[in-house]
Amino acid sequence: MLDLWFTEKWSEDTRFSIKVKEHLYSEETPFQKIDFFTSNEYGRFFTLDGMIMITEKDEFIYHEMITHVPMCTNMNIKKVLVIGGGDGGTVRELTRYSTIEKIDMVEIDERVVRLSQKFLPFTADKLEDKRVTLYFQDGLKFVEECSSETYDLILVDSTDPISVGEGLFTTEFYKNCYRVLKEDGILVNQHESPYYERYSQEMKKAHNKIKNIFPIAKVYQFHQPTYASGHWLFGFASKKYNPTLDCKIEEWNKLDIRTRYYNTDIQMATFALPNYVKAQLEEK
Ligand code: SAM
């Protein structure tokens, strides 16, 4: 029997393939094509429009890094807005903090949530936490209509800036995030990658927009084996707190939150970037 492979195009001349055990499910929604697979190497994984979103084997890296870096920076975060994040992994990490009182998740495609609850219980199992409210609408419109100074933290767990994700990489969106954040608010966004040209262009564009809006605009890195090149970034934008100078290392460690990737040494190191990445971020 012929082997079945899932292949993602990382650049014109680079492909990444995972041998598939079973193609579990496929559905075309009004927003995108959703596919779920099982594999030996990465366990279950799902794709949107042919792009890997998360895999069972390495999702912990992404979801820990999007959450614990800002949470260690400001230990008083109570109200959080997650934009995108349909698989539930980011919300799962947030619910580990008893100090968080409210989590609003704005996901444009309800089918991603419902199918993740069916096929990916390991990421979606905390979406029913009593602090979580789900909104199925465009995140761009949500922040446009949201009152000022509402949230302590906004996590933009979005797809790439194509199709429905495009609006989440605009100046208009970042300006509304700034307005909707409290006076000591923090914005963390999925910030693409420095390695392949297509992703590097998007990273530079996003950073140039954000640094013109927020007084503190940094980028941090982590390795994510199933994203293009494995070298991935988050943007860290803040109205007040510096993530390495103001972070509460001892207080965070006292929470005794068990993680598999993040630790407070990484809090300090993740913002130390390679020279070629720093050079790209300084480009106009
Ligand atoms: N970790 C993944 C990554 O880095 O590519 C993304 C995880 S999550 C699956 C991305 C989610 O963003 C998708 O469920 C998609 O439907 C949602 N999304 C895309 N554009 C959106 C928008 N404008 N408003 C709200 N959600 C959006």
Image (cartoon, rainbow, N blue to C red):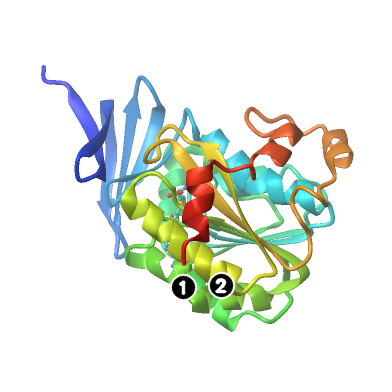
**Where on the image, by quarter, is ligand 1?**
bottom left
- Residue under the image location 24 percent in, 37 percent down: 14
Residue lying farthest left?
A: 1
Depth order, front residue of 115/55: 55
The amino acid on which the numbered mark 1 sits, given as a three-letter code, is Thr
Image coords of residue 28 (percent x, y)? 25, 56
In terms of image quadrants, where is residue 2? top left
Tag 2 near tag 1, CB within 8 Å:
yes
Depth order, front residue of 177/104: 177
**Tag 2's secondary structure?**
helix
Q: Is residue 253 above or below residue 28?
A: above
- Residue under the image location 79 percent in, 57 percent down: 77
Image coords of residue 44 (percent x, y)? 40, 31
Image coords of residue 193 (percent x, y)? 44, 48
**Tag 1's secondary structure?**
loop
**Residue to which mark 2 is pinned:** 174
Depth order, front residue of 50/170: 170
Residue 137 in sight in this render: no
Residue 17 in sight in this render: yes
Q: Is residue 37 above or below residue 277?
A: above
**Residue to which mark 1 is pinned:** 170
